[in-house]
C-alpha cells in the first residue's frame, strides 16, 4: 500500500508539473488554415525512422518534378543507422539528405515557421521525444499537414499515413526536442521561412561536401529572391571561380562592386582573377582600392598584391 | 584505422591542393557573416582530426566499415567535430515500435497515463483525451 501511495504521489506530481506544457505557443487564434501535402507514405521499419523519413520526402520531391534522388532506400539506411545506438543522429540525417542532393534548411524552432512551410507545400521532418525528459524515446517523422477543424497535426508518424495528432500532444512531444525540424528541398526551391544568412549557410554546406552543382543552383535561386545579397553573390562568384567558370565568377564580383564598390573581399578576389587572366595592370588598380581594418582580410589583400607584383605565375 | 587514415590523407591532400592553387582567394568563409572568422589552419586540422575520431567511434558502434568513409565525408567540419565530441549524449531518433517488455511497470503506467493525457505518444493503441 505504501508503494502504491508513493506511485500515486509521483504520478500526480509528474502530471502536475508537465501540465504547464499545455500552454503551447502555437497560433491558436490566427488565420491558420488547413494544409495537406501528399507525401508518399513508407511503412515504418525498426530503428530506421530517420532513413524512412528521408525516403518519404525524397519521393515527394521526385513526384513534384525535376529532382532525382541520388541514393536508394538501402543506401539511406546504411548512411543513417548507428547499430549500437539503435537510431539516427540529427547531423547524420542532415548529412544523408545532402548526399541525396537536397538542401537542408534548419527550421526556426516554432509553429509559425512550421505552418509557413506547410502552407508552401514543403513537408518538414521533425524530431520528437515520444516519451518524457527522463525517459527518452526519440523519433523522426515527416509532418504532412494540419487540420484546422480538428486542430490536429497530420504526420506519417507510424503505421498509418497522415495520422492526426492533436496539436497539444504534438506540441508536448516536439517541445522536448527543442522544436527541432528540418526543411528538405531540391536546391531550386526556397524555404518560405528562410533568411538569406541561414540559407547561405545551408547552400555553402552543400558546396563544402562537394555537391557543387547543387550549391550553384541553390545560390542562384536565393539570388532570384534576394538579388542584392552581397554574401550570396560572393559565394556564387567563389564557387564559379573554384570550378574554373572564370567569366561567370568575374561577373558576380563586379556585381558586388556595383552595390558596394569598397567591398574588400570582392576587390581581392576580382584582383586575383584579373591577375590570373593576364590583366595584371587592372588587377593592381583594383587591389590598390581595397581597404580594411580587419587584420585577417588585410593579410589576404597584401598577399594578393604581392602575387600581382610577382607576375601572377600560379595557375 | 586504415579507413580513417585514408580519409585523413584525402582531406589533407585536397586542403593542400586548394591552398596551392588559390593562395590569395578569400573563401566564402572569409565573409564570416559580418565578422572576420576565417578558418585558421589550426581549426582546419581540428576538423580533420575529428573526422578521424568520428570514423573510429562509428566503427565501435557497429557501423559497417565500408560505409564509414562516405558517412564522414558527407559531414562538414563543424558537424564532424560536434559528433566527435558529443556522440554519447546526442539523441538518436529510433522508431515507433517500442518494446515494452524491458520497460518496468512503473514507466509503463506513467507513459500510458501521459499518453492518454496527450502529453506523450508512446503506444499506438492509446487515443488522447482532448477537449
Image (spheres, coloured by chain):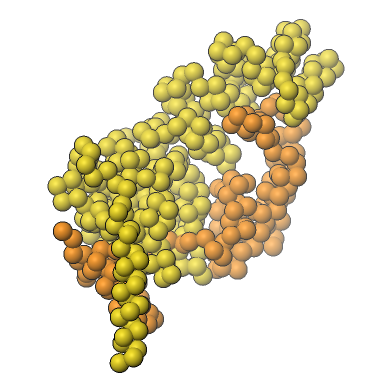
Chain colours: A yellow, B orange
The answer to whether any part of residue B103 appears in the image is yes
Q: What percent of the width, then of the height, locates residue A306? A: 83, 19
The quadrant in which residue A204 appears is top right
* Residue A31 image position (x, y, % from top left): 21, 37
**B95 lies above or below A279:** below
- Horizontal placement of A165 versus A134: left or right? left
> Residue B26 or A55: which is nearer the viewer?
B26
Residue found at x 79% / y 17%: A305
Q: Position of residue A159 (x, y in %)?
A: 25, 63
Image quadrant in which you'd find residue B56 = bottom right
Residue A72 visible to an observer of this rendering: no
Using the image, determine if residue B59 lies above or below residue A90: below
Relative vertical location of residue A72 with respect to residue B105 in this rendering, above or below: above
Residue placed farthest to the right in the image?
A310
Please give the name of the residue rendered at 58% of the width and 23% of the height, measured from the top-left corner.
Answer: A234
| Residue A311 vertical position relative to residue B115 in the rendered view, above or below | above
Q: Residue at x 50, y 67 (%)?
A: A85
Q: In the shown orientation, is residue A198 left or right of residue B19? A: left
- Left-right relation of B43 to A103: right
In the displayed structure, does residue A308 sit left or right of residue A32? right
Quadrant, the C terminus of chain A? top right
Residue A3, given in percent of the width and then of the height, sits at 34, 89
Which residue is nearer to you in this view: A96 or A88? A88
Amino acid at each position: 500500500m505504501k508503494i502504491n501511495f508513493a506511485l500515486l504521489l509521483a504520478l500526480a506530481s509528474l502530471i502536475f508539473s508537465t501540465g504547464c506544457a499545455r500552454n503551447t505557443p502555437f497560433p491558436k487564434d490566427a488565420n491558420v488554415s488547413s494544409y495537406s501535402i501528399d507525401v508518399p507514405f513508407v511503412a515504418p521499419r525498426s530503428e530506421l525512422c530517420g532513413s524512412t523519413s528521408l525516403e518519404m520526402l525524397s519521393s515527394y520531391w521526385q513526384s513534384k518534378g525535376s529532382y532525382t534522388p541520388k541514393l536508394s532506400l538501402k543506401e539511406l539506411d546504411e548512411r543513417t543507422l548507428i547499430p549500437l545506438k539503435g537510431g539516427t543522429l540529427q547531423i547524420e540525417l542532415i548529412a544523408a539528405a545532402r548526399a541525396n542532393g537536397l538542401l537542408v534548411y534548419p527550421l526556426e524552432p516554432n509553429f509559425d515557421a512550421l505552418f509557413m512551410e506547410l502552407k508552401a507545400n514543403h513537408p518538414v521532418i521533425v524530431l520528437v521525444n515520444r516519451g518524457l525528459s527522463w525517459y527518452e524515446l526519440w523519433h523522426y517523422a515527416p509532418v504532412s499537414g494540419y487540420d484546422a477543424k480538428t486542430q490536429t497535426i497530420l504526420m506519417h508518424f507510424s503505421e498509418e499515413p497522415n495520422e492526426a495528432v492533436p496539436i497539444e500532444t504534438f506540441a508536448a512531444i516536439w517541445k522536448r526536442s527543442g522544436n527541432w525540424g528540418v526543411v528538405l528541398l531540391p536546391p531550386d526551391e526556397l524555404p518560405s521561412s528562410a533568411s538569406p544568412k541561414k540559407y547561405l549557410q545551408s547552400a555553402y554546406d552543400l558546396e563544402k561536401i562537394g555537391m557543387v552543382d547543387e550549391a550553384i543552383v541553390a545560390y542562384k535561386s536565393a539570388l532570384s529572391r534576394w538579388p542584392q545579397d552581397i554574401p550570396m553573390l560572393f559565394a556564387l562568384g567563389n564557387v564559379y571561380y573554384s570550378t574554373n567558370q572564370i567569366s561567370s565568377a568575374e561577373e558576380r564580383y563586379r556585381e558586388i562592386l556595383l552595390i558596394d564598390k569598397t567591398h574588400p573581399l570582392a576587390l581581392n578576389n576580382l584582383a586575383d582573377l584579373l591577375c590570373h587572366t593576364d590583366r595584371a595592370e587592372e588587377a593592381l588598380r583594383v587591389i590598390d582600392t581595397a581597404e580594411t581594418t580587419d587584420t585577417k582580410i588585410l593579410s589576404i589583400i597584401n598577399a594578393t598584391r604581392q602575387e600581382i607584383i610577382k607576375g601572377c605565375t600560379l595557375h | 584505422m586504415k579507413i580513417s587514415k585514408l580519409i585523413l590523407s584525402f582531406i589533407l591532400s585536397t586542403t593542400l591542393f586548394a591552398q596551392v592553387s588559390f593562395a590569395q582567394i578569400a573563401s566564402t568563409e572569409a565573409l564570416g557573416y559580418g565578422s572576420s572568422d576565417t578558418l585558421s589552419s589550426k581549426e582546419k586540422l581540428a576538423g580533420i582530426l575529428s573526422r578521424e575520431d568520428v570514423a573510429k567511434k562509428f566503427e565501435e558502434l557497429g557501423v559497417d566499415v565500408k560505409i564509414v568513409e562516405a558517412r564522414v565525408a558527407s559531414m562538414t567540419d563543424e558537424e564532424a567535430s560536434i559528433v566527435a565530441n558529443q556522440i554519447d549524449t546526442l539523441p538518436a531518433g529510433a522508431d515507433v515500435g517500442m518494446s515494452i517488455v524491458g520497460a518496468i511497470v512503473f514507466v509503463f503506467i506513467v507513459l500510458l497515463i501521459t499518453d492518454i493525457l496527450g502529453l506523450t505518444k508512446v503506444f499506438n493503441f492509446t487515443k488522447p483525451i482532448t477537449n
